[in-house]
Image (tube, rainbow, N blue to C red):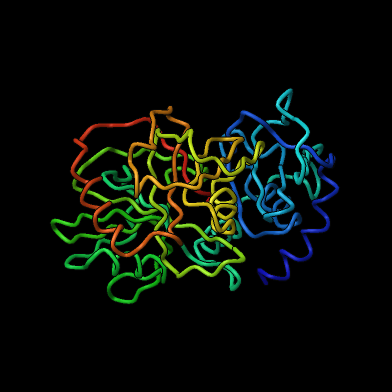
């Protein structure tokens, strides 16, 4: 019933939008972000979820090269700019088939997003010395190591094998405690409140499709509020997806790290894992991400030790995360 309803609604919802080819939205946060989806999926999701998200969904930007889309609570206004590989859809109707939908189907779609498609690899943005501040704990596991914690999240199960959708995890190495999170405080996954806490590791789950093969559960280490200015290979102005940014890095054989902020992705031929002096201060919307596909097994443990030792327990500004689930 679910699949049939999606198929029949995808085509009818297109009449709810005004299509503008080669345009995107600049300098604006999205309410939600979807990955490896068709245009129809994005438009359908906009209609289904508008009533569930604060400002609702008034426009959609679809990234044709990476099959991702961003949903916005406004119609773009003056932020709509030319952007190669992007299509802008302004919602023009809220009646009939375009009317906001609520109910069981939305909850079902939320659950499905915790699963990756066959052509995608489940991966994790890893924040050493941070923890997600949320009471929406789906499962708490004791006496497990870090890799087991991630595996439970990847398989969407708890220690008893009970199904629990998992979008992110907090791990406390000292006590070997794993916290799986199945619901974000809001549908917008672009930002979440993280505490800086030396005792924790935060792992944000995402799905990525690349030409280069990467192992499942590959960690992509994140340095929040940092940026890099050296060893630039190329840049992607107008890229509003951190997953698309790291995917571009993975598929570039010279890329070892990426600097990302909303609307800009920069690829670098050097890695902070090898030279920490490459990192410079940015702001709360910038981050540097290691290319996990190129990190050696020797570097990861040292990174864990170095990063966990430098933080206290303080509150940091909301950090932009991977996608909208």
Indicate left or right for 105 with 61 as reference.
left
Residue 8 pos. (x, y %): 79, 64
Q: In this view, does 252 lie above or below 188?
A: below
Residue 21 pos. (x, y %): 84, 42
Quadrant the N terminus occupies = bottom right
Residue 176 pos. (x, y %): 17, 61
Q: Residue furthest top?
A: 78
Q: Residue furthest left?
A: 175
For the point 64% across and 60% down, which residue is it? 36
Q: 133 and 284: which one is in front?
A: 284
Residue 173 pos. (x, y %): 19, 57
Q: Residue furthest bottom?
A: 161
Task: Report the label total.
Answer: 0
Q: 24 and 19: which one is in front?
A: 24
Q: 49 and 159: which one is in front?
A: 159
Q: In which quarter of the image is residue 218?
A: bottom left
Q: 193 and 67: which one is in front?
A: 67
Q: Is residue 199 above or below residue 41?
A: above
Indicate left or right for 156 with 200 as reference.
right
Indicate left or right for 184 with 171 as reference.
right
For the point 23% across and 49% down, which residue is it? 200
For the point 29% across and 48% down, which residue is it? 128
Q: Quadrant of residue 94?
A: top right
């Amino acid at each position: 019933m679910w699949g049939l309803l999606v198929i029949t609604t995808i085509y009818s919802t297109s009449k709810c939008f005004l299509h503008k080819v080669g345009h995107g939205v600049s300098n604006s946060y999205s309410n939600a972000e979807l990955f490896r989806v068709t245009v129809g999926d994005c438009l359908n999701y906009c209609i289904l979820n508008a009533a569930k998200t604060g400002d609702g969904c008034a426009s959609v930007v679809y990234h044709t090269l990476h099959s991702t889309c961003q949903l916005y609570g406004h119609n773009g206004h003056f932020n709509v700019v030319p952007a190669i590989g992007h299509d802008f859809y302004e919602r023009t109707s809220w009646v009939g088939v375009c009317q906001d939908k609520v109910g069981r189907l939305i909850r079902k779609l939320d659950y499905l997003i915790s699963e990756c498609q066959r052509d995608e690899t489940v991966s994790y943005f890893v924040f050493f010395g941070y923890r997600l501040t949320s009471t929406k704990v789906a499962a708490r596991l004791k006496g497990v190591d870090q890799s087991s914690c991630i595996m439970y999240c990847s398989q969407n199960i708890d220690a008893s094998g009970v199904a629990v959708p998992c979008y992110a995890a907090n791990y406390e190495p000292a006590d070997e405690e794993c916290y799986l999170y199945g619901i974000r405080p809001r549908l917008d996954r672009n930002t979440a409140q993280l505490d800086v806490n030396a005792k924790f590791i935060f792992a944000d789950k995402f799905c990525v499709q690349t030409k280069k093969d990467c192992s499942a559960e590959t960690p992509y280490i994140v340095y929040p509020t940092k940026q890099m200015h050296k060893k630039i290979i190329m840049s992607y102005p107008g890229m509003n997806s951190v997953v698309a940014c790291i995917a571009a890095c993975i598929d570039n054989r010279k890329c070892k790290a990426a600097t990302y902020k909303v609307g800009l992705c920069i690829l670098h031929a050097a890695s902070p894992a090898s030279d920490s002096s490459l990192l410079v201060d940015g702001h709360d919307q910038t981050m540097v991400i290691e290319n996990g596909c190129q990190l050696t097994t020797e570097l990861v443990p040292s990174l864990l030790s170095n990063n966990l030792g430098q933080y206290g327990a303080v509150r940091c500004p909301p950090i932009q995360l991977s996608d909208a689930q």
